[in-house]
Image (tube, helix red, strand yellow):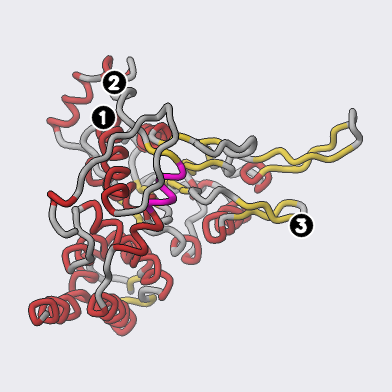
């Protein structure tokens, strides 16, 4: 399975249980359904949509650095609308938005134990983090204590409340945002938490044509345009993750290239803190998912080159006066990518 013709987009009927996803054709069908609905809801953000789908299928999280009104909430809600909860849980919903503020408490995010005087018992009231898709809006405006609570949830898919650990859903996916300009009264994310995000995506203003299209289709989208497009179930997305992990091939040369890039960042005098081993581990499923979105069952050099800046940029700490992080990453990648290209030609 290496060409476009090998993939077929399967039809999905939301009213009956869908067959399990067992191969890359089925996984690609999930990608197509997510892509079609998101592109209908959010115009001019095709690259960000692709990165969201890749992160979702890679079991990662995304940090968006954007301007107010750039469509982050619309994108997150649209992603939540793409998913059918075929295994409903009383405590877990499809989508939740958390507005982070300086006075927010960890219990406001994770939930708390409440005493019921009628039954003389305590019961747990789940917080907004118990959702499939969580929009953490302006995450750098809250205190380090709340950020730490988010860190445990993102890293381990669980929360600890009153010395009791509660599991989050397998699909748990965080989209966090921060404003690149308004820094007053913020708490910058520490390196440990930045490292938990698979991607950091800097969103820019969309092109003139896309903006005109948004204005022209405003009424249609408010009326629910695209609502009839097929969606994906929670189980299908989780199945697709496993299929991608087990089926999309990652050659040893690709893994060697990733380690060589990381070593280049660690030995470069312009970089105070290089790429972590965790970033390489998280990059593997992201590369596999990206290969699937490009209709391939193997990872190639183009996947590495495309995703590197989104995975490494927020993890590197540069020395003062250094060039942009993208330029430094490109230079660190040059020799490893050349070796990878030579190894690929020899095969």
Secondary structure mostly taken by the magenta-highlighted segment of the chain:
helix
Residue under label 3, please give it.
163
Q: Earlier in the sequence, mark 1 or mark 2?
A: 1
Q: Residue at x 36, y 71 (%)?
A: 280
Image spot of residue 46 (x, y percent): 22, 41
Left or right: residue 231 compared with residue 120: left
Residue 103 highlighted magenta (yes or no): no
Above or below residue 209? Residue 2 is below
Residue under label 1, please give it.
40
Q: Is residue 49 visible?
A: no
Above or below residue 26? Residue 16 is above
Residue 237 highlighted magenta (yes or no): yes
In-front residue for pair 175/156: 156
Image spot of residue 2 (x, y percent): 16, 59
Determine contact: label 1, label 2, CB under 8 Å.
yes
Residue under label 2, please give it.
225
Secondary structure at badge 2 equals: loop
Above or below residue 66? Residue 347 is below
Image spot of residue 217 (x, y percent): 22, 20
Q: Which residues are magenta?
A: 234-240
């Amino acid at each position: 399975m290496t060409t476009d013709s090998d993939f077929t987009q399967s039809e999905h009927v939301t009213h009956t249980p869908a067959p399990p996803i067992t191969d890359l054709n089925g996984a690609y069908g999930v990608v197509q359904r997510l892509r079609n609905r998101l592109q209908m809801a959010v115009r001019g953000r095709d690259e960000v949509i692709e990165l969201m789908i890749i992160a979702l299928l890679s079991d990662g999280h995304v940090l968006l650095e954007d301007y107010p009104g750039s469509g982050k909430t619309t994108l997150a809600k649209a992603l939540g609308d793409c998913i059918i909860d075929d295994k409903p849980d009383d405590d877990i919903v499809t989508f939740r938005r958390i507005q982070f503020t300086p006075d927010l408490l960890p219990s406001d995010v994770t939930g708390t134990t409440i005493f019921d005087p009628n039954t003389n018992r305590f019961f747990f009231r789940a917080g907004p983090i118990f959702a499939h898709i969580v929009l953490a809006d302006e995450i750098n405006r809250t205190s380090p204590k709340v950020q730490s609570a988010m860190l445990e949830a993102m890293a381990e898919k669980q929360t600890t409340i009153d010395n009791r650990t509660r599991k989050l859903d397998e699909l748990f996916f965080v989209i966090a945002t921060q404003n690149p300009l308004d820094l007053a009264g913020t708490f910058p994310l520490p390196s440990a938490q930045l490292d938990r995000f698979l991607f950091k995506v800097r969103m820019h203003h969309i092109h003139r044509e896309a903006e005109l299209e948004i204005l022209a289709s405003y009424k249609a989208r408010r009326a629910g345009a695209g609502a009839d497009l097929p969606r994906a179930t929670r189980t299908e997305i989780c199945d697709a993750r496993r299929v991608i992990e087990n089926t999309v091939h990652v050659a040893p040369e690709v893994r060697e290239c990733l380690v060589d890039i990381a070593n280049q960042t660690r030995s470069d005098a312009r970089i105070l803190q290089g790429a972590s081993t965790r970033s390489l581990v998280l990059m593997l499923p992201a590369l596999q998912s990206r290969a699937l979105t490009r209709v391939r069952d193997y990872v190639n050099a183009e996947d590495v080159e495309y995703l590197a800046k989104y995975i490494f940029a927020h993890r590197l700490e540069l020395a003062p006066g250094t060039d942009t992080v993208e330029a430094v990453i490109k230079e660190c990648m040059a020799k490893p990518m050349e070796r990878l290209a030579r190894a690929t030609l020899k095969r």
